[in-house]
Amino acid sequence: MHTGENAHMKPAMSSSLALGCNYGYKALDNGVGRLPVLGYNTWNAYQCNINEDLLLETAQLMKSLGLQVHSIMIDKSVMNILTYSLGRWIQLCNIDDCYAEKNRSAVAISSQVTSPGLLLPSDVAANPRIAADTVRFKSGMKTLTDKIHALGFKTGIYSDSGWFTCGGYPGSYSNELRDLKTFNDWGFDYLKYDNCAIPYDAITREGIIGRYKRMADAVEEFTSLPAALRFCCPSANGDGARSGFGESCLDRAGEPLAISRLFGTLCEYHQLQLLPHTSNRFNGRNDLDMLQLGNGNLTFDESKSHFTAWALMKSPLFIGTNLSAITNETLSILKNKEILAINQDPIVGTSISPFRWGLNPDWTSDSNFPAQYWSGPTQDGTVFMLLNTLNEPSTLFFNLTESPWIRAGRQYSVRDLWTHTDNGTAVRNFTAPDVPAHGVVALLLKDAGNEPDGLYPKCSVWWQCTDKNGTRVGG
């Protein structure tokens, strides 16, 4: 999203919406979009400076850089230049804004699709199609998508629920079904849907959910076309985030990362997710926006923190940097298959959540120092993220049972997801010494049986620890 700026099958598009579990709508439970999308998006690196040669080169680089194949298990969802099936990334390349002509074109559509609620009028002069830029995409979108599909990738396109896109190009309001048909004719598998240039209230008589539901209805009417829609839900005041809208529309609220590359901005994004993390689950999630790895002045440790937070919070992961200039350090982060496996967990779809803030009292809103201690369930154990928000190294300590996913009286084997090492067994607590400034520790803890006998105090958290005779047991 950039509010304010801005094995191929036919039919090409697939269908997945998680509209309005909190508002009375129901996600289409067809298996598409069940897991976070993984892919490449053009906006962060190139904004409007895109053309067919750049897209094809990017797809070729995804393949040559080894970003296509990984030994992790994912479902068969349609995704962005990055899609997973058994043992590989099947990648999806998503064209963002600015690919179109500034005006629609009265070009005939190959076939008509009609429904009682969303008609596709035959009068194309009155209701013309979106037209691709004839200079920058001179070979035509269908030729481009065919070439990218031939490389083993899926393809994605962009539109908007308003009159215009965020970059000032034609939006899809009142043309939802027509545009969906156009994108299908062009061979696209996936749609990113934004929320700029909103029509007057007297015209829509709807809020953001109603405007998004118009496209959801178009997808549902397009029954022969399963289409995976990524819904951006921008909201400058964060109302969408607070309402749990990620569950409703496969995305999140908040301002974009398109300008600042500073760690503080990433912390602000991280802070936005403190409340809406409960809306993350299969078929719907809060989207932290495209990755900034490889952009700006992030250090290696900041980049690891950025990627860990986005992945473990079950955000879609869109690479958004110039792949022709990518460093080995950035590639090593993107290829961390242990982190990616948790993002793509096919059994447990919930996000990590904070169990202690650390520097601040719990539930403090501070974008400079967001919560430091996070945990969540996975099919293989409990995952922890420890984030050092200080400008200097810090030791991070926690009691295991502070996490709601840990059982008292048990011990846990410790797997470090960044060093890829097994680090012994944790009993009652864990200490991570000398975490680098703005660095992260990611751990997977697995139950390893009862803790040793004879430990004192009798409770790992001794406050309120009580004998059956009523005696308090101190620590």
Image: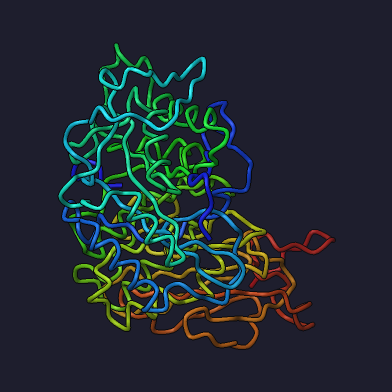
Residue in the foreground of this view, choosing between 403 and 184 = 184
Residue in the foreground of this view, choosing between 469 and 419 = 419
In the image, what residue occupies the spot 73% across and 74% down?
410
Q: In which quarter of the image is residue 430?
A: bottom right
- Residue 260, given in percent of the width and then of the height, sits at 19, 58
Residue in the foreground of this view, choosing between 166 and 342 = 166
Q: In this view, does 460 lie above or below 99?
A: below
In the image, what residue occupies the spot 15% across and 49% down?
135
Q: In this view, does 52 lie to the left or right of 223?
A: left
In the image, what residue occupies the spot 46% across and 46% down?
275
Q: In this view, does 453 lie above or below 363?
A: below
Q: In this view, does 10 lie to the left or right of 107?
A: right
- Residue 27, given in percent of the width and then of the height, sits at 58, 37
Q: Which residue lies furthest to the top in this view?
A: 202
Q: In this view, does 56 lie above or below 136?
A: below
- Residue 256, given in percent of the width and then of the height, sits at 26, 49
- Residue 334, given in percent of the width and then of the height, sits at 40, 73
Q: In this view, does 434 lie to the left or right of 171?
A: right
Q: Is residue 104 above or below residue 451?
A: above
In the image, what residue occupies the spot 32% across and 60% down?
369
Residue in the foreground of this view, choosing between 158 and 396 = 158
